[in-house]
Amino acid sequence: MTAGASVASSACPRSTAHVEVTHRPGIADPAGATVERALPALGYTNVAQVHIGKTIRLVVDAADADAARRQVNEMCERLLANPVIEAYEVVIS
C-alpha cells in the first residue's frame, strides 16, 4: 500500500498495530523526572525510575502481519519515533 492509500480498502486484511515509544537508555527524560520529583509530595515515596513515553495505535491494511509490521517499522523510522533518542516496539494483532 502506498503512503496515500486509504485504510478503507477491503482488498487486504486489517492489522492493528500498537507502537510503544520510549527514550533510549541514557537519554534524559525530563517529563519522567518531573513526575518522579512530584510524587513524594503526594505521599508516594516508594516510586522510582519514572519514564514517560507514548503509545500509538494504528489500523493497517496489509497482505499479512509481517507486511504490516514492516510498514509500521518504516513509519516509526521515518515519522513516529526519533531513532536517535527513542526506542520503539511494534506489536501487531
Image (tube, rainbow, N blue to C red):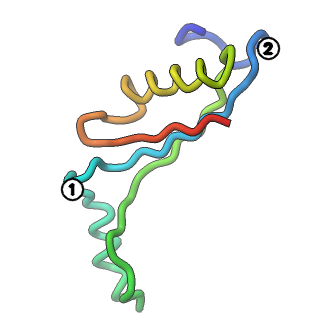
- Percent position (x, y) of residue 2? 56, 8
Specify the quadrant of the image occupied by residue 51. bottom left
| Residue pointed to by mark 1 | 28
- Percent position (x, y) of residue 8? 74, 18
Determine whether, in the image, residue 42 is placed left or right of residue 28: right
Query: Which residue occupies 38% across, 58% down?
Result: 52
SS at badge 1 = loop
Query: Which residue occupies 34% across, 71% down?
Result: 35
In the image, what residue type sits under mark 1? Answer: Ala
Determine whether, in the image, residue 8 is placed left or right of residue 45: right
- Percent position (x, y) of residue 29? 27, 57
Crowding at label 2, few (<14), some or many (≥20) Cα neighbours within 10 Å? few
View extreme (right): residue: 10
Which image quarter is the C terminus in?
A: top right
Specify the quadrant of the image occupied by residue 4. top right
Q: Are marks 2 and 1 in contact (CB under 8 Å)?
A: no
Query: Which residue occupies 51% across, 21% down?
Result: 70
Crowding at label 1, few (<14), some or many (≥20) Cα neighbours within 10 Å? few
| Residue pointed to by mark 2 | 10
Q: How many marks?
A: 2
Q: Earlier along the polypeptide chain: callout 2 or callout 1? A: 2
